[in-house]
Image: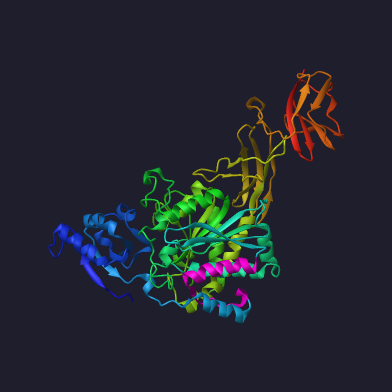
């Protein structure tokens, strides 16, 4: 039971007959040097929750027992005075349990005893320095499959770290990019611990467990265990006991992103924070196709949208994926675990509206599929229970990563040059609200997650003729559809030639002469029509000129492509 620390009625005319200025002063005294307070107030006294939801930070389960639970900050004084709310200040969630902390000396002692992280007991939280060192230890122990990158160093000196895991870390491949990130609310620490445990689990089982080995070989994995280190270690680098929901400036980072709903303004959560900017830049540099944002406070998989009342076009896919996560977790946990709301899943706006959330930002602005995963009813559970939470969630966390391999995928290329293309992949009669995706450069690979069914898929790219194909999708399976787009002759062909050459006469009638500026050991010459079909193939060695017979060709536009070990060249000509 939560102990009541203080009840204060705030209003221009309140029960203590305080003046407005007295109320402001009293409000400020409540904080006593703190940047954040956890409070509740009677729901019956509030005219409109939506009216203040963008001003204060509603808890993940805001409506309970006739009260609204929220976090407030000094900048909220005016809106709270206007609402005349009777606030009850509660103990901070991070103060309800004394976490077991391990410094680096203690961890290295345990690592020496147990040889590696693979056999380590994870019922603890690391001090901040131990966290940094532990992340670097992953890289040291598994350099072939793990690299630790810094998303940004914050003004506090703490860093946003991410583990990059896979079989070819420095090579662009035809692979989906997957992201787990946790604890952007600094006082929700279950995911912080589970993310570290997950990194160790993946690294330790690579080469030994076929499922994990295939996952690392086929998916480009990124895991950011701590998205708000300033909040998690607000009480100092040696403990998460004083953790805050907000960052060092008192901003809820999960209300701080650009929002897709134009009615909510460019940034509902106030001035963009350094953590938000860093993550936006990080996401822009990658092409994440599927991700999850780990939180705590309830037990549910929350899927888009948070900001819109309407459903996401892929609502049936989201229900399928979230249902699978909930079912898997329930199968590995005691009865009653992870069954909040609709037996463990909920649409975001059905729960409560959120503006400026990262889930909707990733889905709308980065064309990724991200959901919000609430791991435990306790935001900061007893450390001794963390291994149990791992047992409950481990299989579901891995299963969700494997979803990256399912659905529709392929590579989009130029039908003439065979170069990769940045193309828009749009499901006709289905996509809206930025639910379409784009192919990723430099490979040209795309990944479109869909519920089972038949779909008409349109591929478009600047300077190319569009192409629409029908495809059948099965749940839990991968459907491959590689697509070549034909250059739009009217739009012209971009000058991408690596092997320059000339064609004459142009237009041609019987013969077409090819003249190169230099000879190559071997070269292949292809004659191609506008559909991308190769009509002729010729092999030449050490020549600077060649001749093609074009007498039998129908009148129209064609292409000549020359391929050598140094690259290709392409030119168009007109057959008279």
Q: Is residue 503 above or below residue 219?
A: above
Q: Is residue 305 visible?
A: no
Residue 200 seen = yes
Counting labels gives: 0
What span is in magenta?
116-142
Q: Residue at x 64, y 32 (%)?
A: 464
Compared across the picture, whether 519 is left or right of 498 comes to right
Q: Residue furthest left?
A: 17
Q: Magenta residues: mostly which secondary structure?
A: helix
Position in image of residue 190 (x %, y %): 48, 69
Q: Residue at x 19, y 62 (%)?
A: 25
Residue 298 image position (x, y, % from top left): 43, 67
Q: Vertical placement of 28 versus 564: above or below?
A: below
Q: Is residue 570 above or below residue 74?
A: above
Along the line of sight, the residue nearer the viewer: 394 or 114: 114
Q: Give the side of residue 83 with respect to residue 181, left or right.
A: left
Type of colouring: rainbow
Tell which of 327 and 568 is nearer to you.
568
Quarter-of-image position of residue 349: bottom left
Q: Magenta span has 155?
A: no
**Residue 415: x and y, percent?**
71, 36
In which quadrant is the N terminus drawn? bottom left
Q: Is residue 348 left or right of residue 5?
A: right
Residue 440 picture location, percent across and down = 61, 46
Residue 572 as seen in the image, left or right of residue 257 = right
The structure residue drawn at horizontal position 54% and vertical position 57%, both measured from the top left corner, is 291
Quadrant for the C terminus in the image: top right
For image coordinates 41% across by 77% down, the residue present is 98
Task: Looking at the picture, tell me which residue is in the foreground, 33 or 462.
Answer: 33
Q: Closer to the camera, 13 or 351?
A: 13
The vertical placement of 518 against 45, above or below, is: above
């Amino acid at each position: 039971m939560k102990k009541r620390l203080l009840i204060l009625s705030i209003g221009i005319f309140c029960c203590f007959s305080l003046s407005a200025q007295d109320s402001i002063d009293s409000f400020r005294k409540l904080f006593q040097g703190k940047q954040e307070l956890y409070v509740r107030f009677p729901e019956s006294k509030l005219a409109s929750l939506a009216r203040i939801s963008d001003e204060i930070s509603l808890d993940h389960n805001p409506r309970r027992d006739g009260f609204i639970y929220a976090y407030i900050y000094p900048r909220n004084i005016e809106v709270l005075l206007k609402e005349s709310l009777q606030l009850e200040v509660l103990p901070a969630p991070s103060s309800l349990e004394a976490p077991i902390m391990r410094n680096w000396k203690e961890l290295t002692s345990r690592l020496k005893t147990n040889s590696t992280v693979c056999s380590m007991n994870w019922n603890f939280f690391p001090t901040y320095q131990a966290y940094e060192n532990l992340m670097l230890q992953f890289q040291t122990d598994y350099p072939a499959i793990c690299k630790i990158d810094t998303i940004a160093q914050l003004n506090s000196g703490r860093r946003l770290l991410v583990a990059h895991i896979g079989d070819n870390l420095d090579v662009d491949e035809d692979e989906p990019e997957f992201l787990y990130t946790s604890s952007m609310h600094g006082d929700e620490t279950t995911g912080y611990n589970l993310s570290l445990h997950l990194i160790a689990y993946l690294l330790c089982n690579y080469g030994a467990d076929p499922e994990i080995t295939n996952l690392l070989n086929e998916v480009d994995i990124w895991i950011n265990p701590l998205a708000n280190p300033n909040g998690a270690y607000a009480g100092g680098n040696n403990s998460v006991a004083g953790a805050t929901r907000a960052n060092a400036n008192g901003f809820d980072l999960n209300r701080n992103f650009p929002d897709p709903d134009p009615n909510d303004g460019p940034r509902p959560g106030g001035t963009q924070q350094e953590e938000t900017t860093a993550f936006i830049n990080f996401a822009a540099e990658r092409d994440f196709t599927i991700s999850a944002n780990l939180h705590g406070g309830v037990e549910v998989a929350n899927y888009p949208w948070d900001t819109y009342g309407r459903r996401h076009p892929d609502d049936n896919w989201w229900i399928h994926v979230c249902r699978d996560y909930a079912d898997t977790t329930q199968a590995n946990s005691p009865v009653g675990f992870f069954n909040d709301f609709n037996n463990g899943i909920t649409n975001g706006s059905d729960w409560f509206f959120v503006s400026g959330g990262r889930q909707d930002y990733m889905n709308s602005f980065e064309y990724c599929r991200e959901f919000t995963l609430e791991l435990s009813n306790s935001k900061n559970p007893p450390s001794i229970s963390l291994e149990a939470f791992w047992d409950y969630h481990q299989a579901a966390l891995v299963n969700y990563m494997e979803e990256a391999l399912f659905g529709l995928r392929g590579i989009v290329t130029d039908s003439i040059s065979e170069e990769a293309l940045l193309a828009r992949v749009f499901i006709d009669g289905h996509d809206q609200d930025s639910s379409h995706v784009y192919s990723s450069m430099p490979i040209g690979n795309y990944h479109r997650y869909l519920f089972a069914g038949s779909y008409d898929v349109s591929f478009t790219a600047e300077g190319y003729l569009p192409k629409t194909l029908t495809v059948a999708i099965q749940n839990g399976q991968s459907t491959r559809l590689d697509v070549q787009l034909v250059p739009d002759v009217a739009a012209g062909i971009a000058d991408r030639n690596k092997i320059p050459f000339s064609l004459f006469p142009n237009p041609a009638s019987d013969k077409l002469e090819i003249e190169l500026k230099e000879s190559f050991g071997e070269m292949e010459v292809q004659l191609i029509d506008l559909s991308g079909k190769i009509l002729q193939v010729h092999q030449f060695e050490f020549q600077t000129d060649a001749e093609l017979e074009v007498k039998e060709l129908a009148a129209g536009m064609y292409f000549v492509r020359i391929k050598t070990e140094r690259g290709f060249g392409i030119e168009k000509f007109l057959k008279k």
